[in-house]
Image: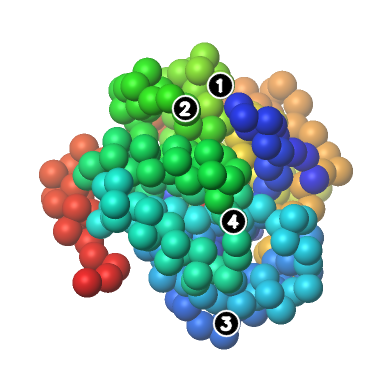
Amino acid sequence: MNYVTLNNGVKMPQLGFGVYQIPDSPECEQNVLEAIEAGYRSFDTAAGYLNEGSVGRAIAKSGVLREELFITTKLWIQDASYEAAKKAFQNSLKQLGVEYIDLYLIHQPFGDYYGAWRALEELYKEGSIRAIGVCNFEPDRLLDLILNSEIKPAINQVEIHPFFQQKELKALAKEYDVQLEAWGPFAEGKYGIFTNEVLSKIAKKHGKTVGQVVLRWHMQSGVVTIPKSVHKERMVENFNIWDFELDAEDMADIESLDTGHSEIINFHDIETIKFLVGAKIHD
Ligand code: NAP
């Protein structure tokens, strides 16, 4: 496993496991246990996924020491304010059955996220969170938060994959030492990613799968990522990416696939913003 060192010195596995769209259920628990068996130690959940309970139960059952795990969860938009963030954080701890969170992220760049950030800064200073960060912050909002906060975000978790490479954000993150983390590393299966000609050719050349090539590209681009799968064989496949290397030509060919925009979500779309701002996960 490769590790990245965040801007506060905390080490984070570069490859983890995401649980978005896996309903809170014995199956989710089983998926996380299988991922632990496959070797994953970093897990990405969110209050908004409503499955922190399953992740917590799997962690407890696994018998793996807490300090060997890296747990990420996120503050939902409904709780994006100082007071609500403090309360939501306690609830996430309870759901996950842990005493601290490794990485706590503001899930969306909407609402009173500055108030929420102040709450995260305090929780970080108290030692309840090892690193704090954000998700889905485009370059302007990320820079504004960096310039107006005591503690700058350690992570910005955003959509990144070969078809949406986020080059402007990558440059800004590098300049200000904010680690980028890719959600949707496989573009959630869109853009015909798993049968793409360029990726398939590279996969064949290395005797690997398209999924492995894509994850290797994320690793060699210096990005952290958290692929999701409910299939054990794919969890194993996605974890087995350390025995080959993409060369300069492969990297350039993948770079040429960038479309510069997302087919998954558009944070400038008014209907999307209205939907997110109104999305409640509790009373
Ligand atoms: P993703 O990881 O890009 O793609 C998951 C899809 O790819 C699933 O349909 C999965 O199918 C399939 N898949 C996985 N491995 C495969 C393989 N080796 N071969 C073929 N198909 C494969 O999408 P994601 O779940 O949206 O993103 C990953 C994680 O990022 C999430 O789980 C979540 O933790 C996080 N995330 C964060 C945000 C945010 O706003 N911060 C947004 C979205 C996601 P099966 O499950 O059927 O195998």
The percent coordinates of residue 50 (x first, y second) are 41, 70
* Vertical comparison of 163 with 15: above or below: above
**Nearer-N-terminus badge (3/2):** 3
Q: Position of residue 35 (x, y in %)?
A: 70, 66
Mark 1 or mark 2: which comes first in sequence? 2
Which SS class for mark 2? loop
Quadrant of the drawing holding the N terminus: top right
Here the colouring is rainbow
**At label 1, which amino acid type do we have?**
Asp
Q: CA distance from mark 3 to mark 1?
A: 38 Å
The residue that label 2 is drawn on is 152
Give the structural element (helix, strand or loop) at label 3: helix
Q: Residue 100 bears which disc, if any?
A: 4
Q: Is residue 187 left or right of residue 201?
A: left
Residue 83 in sight in this render: yes
Q: CA distance from mark 3 to mark 2?
A: 37 Å
The first of marks 3 and 1 along the sequence is 3
**Depth order, front residue of 104/19:** 104
| Residue at 55 percent of width and 50 percent of height | 128
Q: Secondary structure at mark 1?
A: loop
Q: Is mark 4 within 8 Å of ligand 1?
A: no
Q: Amino acid at mark 2?
A: Lys
Distance from Cα at disc 1 to Cα at disc 2: 9 Å
Mark 3 highlights which residue?
Answer: 27
Please tell me how crowded label 2 is: few (under 14), some (14-19), or many (20+) other residues with Cα within 10 Å: many
Q: Mark 1 = which residue? A: 177
Tags 3 and 1 in contact by the CB under 8 Å rule? Answer: no
Q: Please state which of the two labelled residues, at mark 4 or mark 1, is closer to the viewer.
A: 4
Pointer 2 with pointer 4, Cβ within 8 A: no
Given the image, on which type of amino acid does mark 3 rest?
Glu
Closer to us: mark 3 or mark 1? Answer: 1
